Amino acid sequence: MDFASMPIIAVGAGVLGLIFAFYFATSVLKASPGNARMQEISQAIQEGAMAYLNRQYRTLIPFVIVIFFLLFFLKSWETGISFLFGAVLSASAGYVGMGITTRANARTTEAARTSLNKALGVSFRAGAVMGLSVAGLGIIGVSVLYLWFQDAEIINSFAFGASAIALFARVGGGIYTKAADVGADLVGKVEAGIPEDDPRNPAVIADNVGDNVGDTAGMGADLFESYAASTIAAMLVGVTVFKQVNAGLPGLMLPLMIGVAGLISSIIASFFVRTGENANPQTALNMGLWGTNILTAIASYGIVNMMLPPTLKISDTLTLTPNRVFIAIIAGLLVNVLIGLLTEYYTSNQKKPAQGIAKASETGAATNIIAGLATGLKSTALPVIVICVAIFVSFQVAGIFGIAIAAMAMLSTAGMVVAIDSFGPVADNAGGIAEMAELEPEVRKTTDKLDSVGNTTAAVAKGFAIGSAALTALALFNAFSELAHVQKIDILVPTTIIGLFIGAAVPFLFSAFAMEAVGKAAFEMIGEVRRQFREIPGLMEGKAKPDYRACVDISTKAAIRQMIVPGLLAVGTPLLVGFGLGKDAMGGMLAGGTVAGLLMAIFMANAGGAWDNAKKYIEAGNLGGKGTPTHAAAVIGDTVGDPFKDTAGPSLNALIKVMGTISLIIAPFLR
Amino acid sequence: MDFASMPIIAVGAGVLGLIFAFYFATSVLKASPGNARMQEISQAIQEGAMAYLNRQYRTLIPFVIVIFFLLFFLKSWETGISFLFGAVLSASAGYVGMGITTRANARTTEAARTSLNKALGVSFRAGAVMGLSVAGLGIIGVSVLYLWFQDAEIINSFAFGASAIALFARVGGGIYTKAADVGADLVGKVEAGIPEDDPRNPAVIADNVGDNVGDTAGMGADLFESYAASTIAAMLVGVTVFKQVNAGLPGLMLPLMIGVAGLISSIIASFFVRTGENANPQTALNMGLWGTNILTAIASYGIVNMMLPPTLKISDTLTLTPNRVFIAIIAGLLVNVLIGLLTEYYTSNQKKPAQGIAKASETGAATNIIAGLATGLKSTALPVIVICVAIFVSFQVAGIFGIAIAAMAMLSTAGMVVAIDSFGPVADNAGGIAEMAELEPEVRKTTDKLDSVGNTTAAVAKGFAIGSAALTALALFNAFSELAHVQKIDILVPTTIIGLFIGAAVPFLFSAFAMEAVGKAAFEMIGEVRRQFREIPGLMEGKAKPDYRACVDISTKAAIRQMIVPGLLAVGTPLLVGFGLGKDAMGGMLAGGTVAGLLMAIFMANAGGAWDNAKKYIEAGNLGGKGTPTHAAAVIGDTVGDPFKDTAGPSLNALIKVMGTISLIIAPFLR
């Protein structure tokens, strides 16, 4: 095997991904942006989103520069450069994706006037631009750094750069979107009594901007980071495990080639996404997702048999074979599918859990809240078992390398997962634009079809992001032990237990901060929306235009200000524990943070999703429908669920990974 | 030192505790039980409580017998006997305490007609009967078994017996009390519009019974178990650490003697509890609590210097001295005090967190819930740090033995803590009886003073129960490693990580089951109360009496039925993990369960307490007071908090300990 050329193949695949991203972007931009009113709204959303991203990144520049210099002087110039590269590429993926999704919204609305399939095409392709950019830039970044430095330890700080950006993007975007949402709903819908997405609502543009900065940019940065971190962790583990063969090259290169397989499968499967005019667009997206998983599996089978030696004895009890590694890959891909199905079960309004919450709303808000919390808590068990089985199986067949490669396999499909996730906010925005531009009701019906599918795919992507974050964290954990030269992290050592306690407490405290941040930001937003309704004459009558920009500004400033404290908690704790209590505590902290972070993330995401869909179930006319006390109780649950599922929950993925990548950075100091 | 006679001294101290319990019981029973109406109500509560306890224990008999025979045949007849002994003594502590507290309620009401100090005396002494029974029976049980079998491993199954009873007492009692409470409030207060504790409410007796079976019997069984388990764990660790001296006798006997110190200190300090007629009774109870801690500290200083060798080199880096062990004891006692203060801070209506939740109620139920959840999540950080510092300090000064003895020291004050905790439901019941017997309003004012103090002491006791459960679990954890002959529990081993994940998921799933159980039981209760209001003519007008017994029956049956699933989860998981995945996974499960269980328990207890007091803060006339939308929002938060703080939260203590004691039982099989 010509291992030396593989990073070049990987770069080639990454470039191919970017070429298709460009192709999809062109095809989206060719579509008609609709009438003047639609273009005006779309532009306002686009400007708001870009203004937020600019400001967020500008705020992070000093932070990035300080860490860059710290790495540069305390470790090496190469680690500094890698870090910077990771931060810049993660930010770029956000920019590119947001640039296109915010341009695709009005175009989707316009396409929806004539055809469901066309509207799906525009919105999915916009999502695919984001997805392929994430995967393409991720694999290019890792490969280029490998070609340049030939040192997996240096490349790791690429993942750290990406995770730092991802953390703030998740937290900031999460706060932004919910502050705007709560402000728009509480004053507009509840107090003023105007419908959702009504153009008279001053916070309506901020709300639509929020969908993009939270779901698109945040999720993109998050999965870019998981992608990079799991590739690097698998490379670090692989080079050690295969050290007897070609200086470890098969183990080092296999993760890259699995990444290539996943990326190309995502490109191919994106052409499967098309729907009949009366069909359920869910089927189309499922085709894309299943297609990617199946193609990746088939390609991986060829790759492991081509690249790996027929047998390799790595310990007295374990002899690696290509088929054993293949089983680990299948285990990783199955985690994808199973966690997605479980998430759907616990959150869909077609299924018992959400309907049970709806039923509990009949006796009021308190029972709705208790039912939602119980559902969320209960929903943690099966995903944890799925992850445990995957860990067990992949370890049995291929040792530690099996776990790392399972994580990598799972993430290799990120191109498609991000695509179907980013599709959601586009469809959501498209509906909003149809409403605000006062188009015929049929258009809204078509976009609603897409939007409801978007809610399911968002849930699937959330499950994917959480599950992959946990597996990535485990891979990082093993990489940490290599780099810190620790042979064991023994829980019988009290400092390890202390680390475990502290690590597990971080997700609790972090979630509290994130939820409080939403509260504070929403409070400012409510004040502003109320002020506009009060002070702008003729606003309620539709004679005057609200000051959308003021609301966008408030969300932006509040999100930026409020993301600092949780961000510092995430970055500061590993440093304090590592340098203050040593490597045992550090290992304990990583384990505690990963386990508690995973559980809290699943709990919050699923409780939030179930509350949301319980409300939708009632709004669809069940249990009395809209306007009943039952509905009012369900609305309270949905509002509680908002910061759960869109702020705290998703930020926890970024939290556990940033703890992991920092631990790798400081590991050599703890030897 | 005459170590051989020490268990006899310990038995003597235990008997002394029981004598004082008997003395206090006599003095309570001598007080006047009030008029005929008061006696009738008190009797109804007493009968309901006893009926529940009888039924609960009867349900557990088959379970206890099966385990007895399993232990008898699979391990040894001695372990079987120890288990049975633990189960019977734990149940007895519950019986004795409930017998007196349910007789003290009307007597407290009667005393409150003339004097606050007298009312405090009756109610506190009733609590002290429970407290001294728990501590006295605990130390007698452990000592007698030691004298009989001279084998710490056998005595451990005494702790297992106690923890099995404690688990079901906590879960069942927690479900009972909240089902009755929700039923009484939702139909009586909200639907029928009658006041709290109104005799026309069919669920009013069940509600008062619930206070006793939840707070008194549940807490008593729980702390009896912590007391026994931490003594035994410290003895197991001590005998190993001191093996060079007198065959380990100093290490084996020190925990017993610390227990003696704490018990006698509790007896002495219980005479400090008296108040002036216009003083705050809180000061009196604080005197009791502080007195116990200070006396225990002083006595321990003498004990360690008398019993331990001046120096003992136990490793290359650690030489034990009496003063070093004393520092560990102080660390344990300080955890008591600090966790109590933190719990009070996060839940008191005089402090910012609860007032912040009250303020958040102004914008509705959703913001109230979000604020309460955030407060609960945030409140986990400082208690965890306190526990970590205590672990760190006690390990630094005295190694593993330091941690075990810190836990023991903390629990040695259980006599007083249980006393001030059990005092709460007596005062609460006394207020209810004043209301139901339609006494003059001044009486209710006096009992309300006691009741509000009871809420604070209940919070302090909850913090104590949680913190001590965590330290006990750690001590059990080390004892497990001794018995399973494991040198390390390495988180780099995948089965350990799997155990960690599963262990951490158990508290989440368990909490969900507990909360759902309350929902189901409350649902049945609501149906029955509504039925009685509908079908009994003249009930609302006070012309006919409701059928209290039917409501008591429903709570009883529902609690018994609903406690089975969470109970089996707690008992079954360690068995499955231990025998299915081995000792690494078992170790990981214990660590994960302890860490996640502690965090969830603090989160739920403090969120619930803060919601409760936020409501009380508004009811005291702040932010508009009763009857406003703000108050309505706060009531919703309080209702959500009920199963948090009184069912799921406290049951988690029992959960993590039962997982620990089971692990000790099966440890030898996993070698």
Image (cartoon, coloured by chain):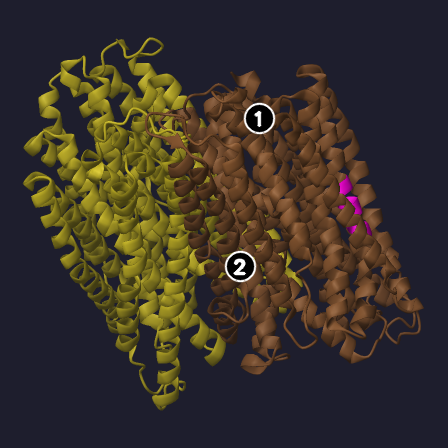
Chain colours: A brown, B yellow
Let me know if residue A95 is in the magenta part. yes
| Rendered residue at 38%/45% (across/down) | B502
| Rendered residue at 56%/50% (across/down) | A464
Q: Is residue A388 above or below residue B647?
A: above
Task: Give amino acid for label 2.
Answer: Ala
Type of secondary structure dominating the magenta stretch? helix
Q: Is residue B153 above or below residue A371?
A: above
| Rendered residue at 63%/52% (across/down) | A417
Which of pointers 2 and 1 indicates the residue nearer the eye? 1
Task: Give amino acid for label 1.
Answer: Leu
Q: Quadrant of the N terminus of chain B?
A: top left
Residue stretch rendered in magenta on the structure: A92-99
Q: Residue furthest bottom?
A: B537
Q: Quadrant of the C terminus of chain B?
A: top left
Q: Is residue B386 visible?
A: no
The residue closer to the viewer here, B602 or A320, is A320
Label 1, residues with CA under 10 Å away: few <14, some 14-19, many ≥20: many
Marker disc for residue A607: 2
Question: Dot 2: what SS?
Answer: helix
Label 2 is found on which chain of the structure? Answer: A
Relative placement, left or right, of A360 versus A424 is: left
The x, y position of residue A52, in whole percent, is: 81, 47
Q: Is residue B632 above or below residue A343?
A: below
Marker disc for residue A71: none
Q: Is residue A224 visible?
A: yes
Structural distance between the alpha carbons of marks 2 and 1: 33 Å
The residue closer to the viewer here, A164 or B275, is A164
